[in-house]
Amino acid sequence: MSTLSVPLTAPLEEYVKRMVRCGYASTKADVLRRALTRFIEEDAINAVLQAEQEAREGKVLKGNLHKLLKALP
């Protein structure tokens, strides 16, 4: 596991401390790990939603995957 040093604005630092005080997380590092995990989950959800939208718009490839790959430049 690596350690990062990230400067935070005063409001962000206060928010992180508040999350620890209210029991959301056990440490400040835990707050940030949870926030990053949530960010990753939201990013994955957005990717799925975008793919669904593209499928509704007909922007999908259909057929044999090997043939489709060969057709790509």
Image: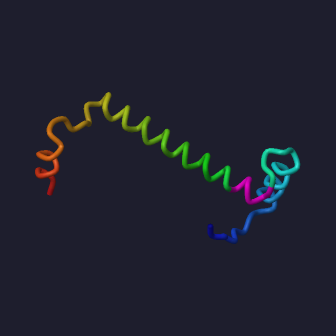
Residue 16 percent location from the top left of the image: 79, 54
Q: Is residue 22 magenta?
A: no
Q: Is residue 54 above or below residue 39?
A: above
Viewer-proximal residue among 7 and 3: 3
Image position of 58 (left or right of 28): left
Residue at the far right: name it: 21
Q: Is residue 29 magenta?
A: yes
Q: Quadrant of residue 29?
A: bottom right
Q: How many marks?
A: 0
Residue at the far top: name it: 56
Image position of 12 (left or right of 61): right
At horizontal 61% and vertical 50% (from top left) the residue drawn is 37
Image position of 37 (left or right of 63): right
Chief secondary structure of the magenta portion: helix
> Quarter of the image containing the N terminus?
bottom right
Residue 41 percent location from the top left of the image: 55, 44
Residue 46 percent location from the top left of the image: 48, 40
At horizontal 15% and vertical 45% (from top left) the residue drawn is 68
Q: Quadrant of residue 8?
A: bottom right
Q: Quadrant of residue 54?
A: top left
Q: Is residue 58 above or below residue 24?
A: above
State the extent of the magenta-drawn residues as a range.
27-32
The chosen color scheme is: rainbow
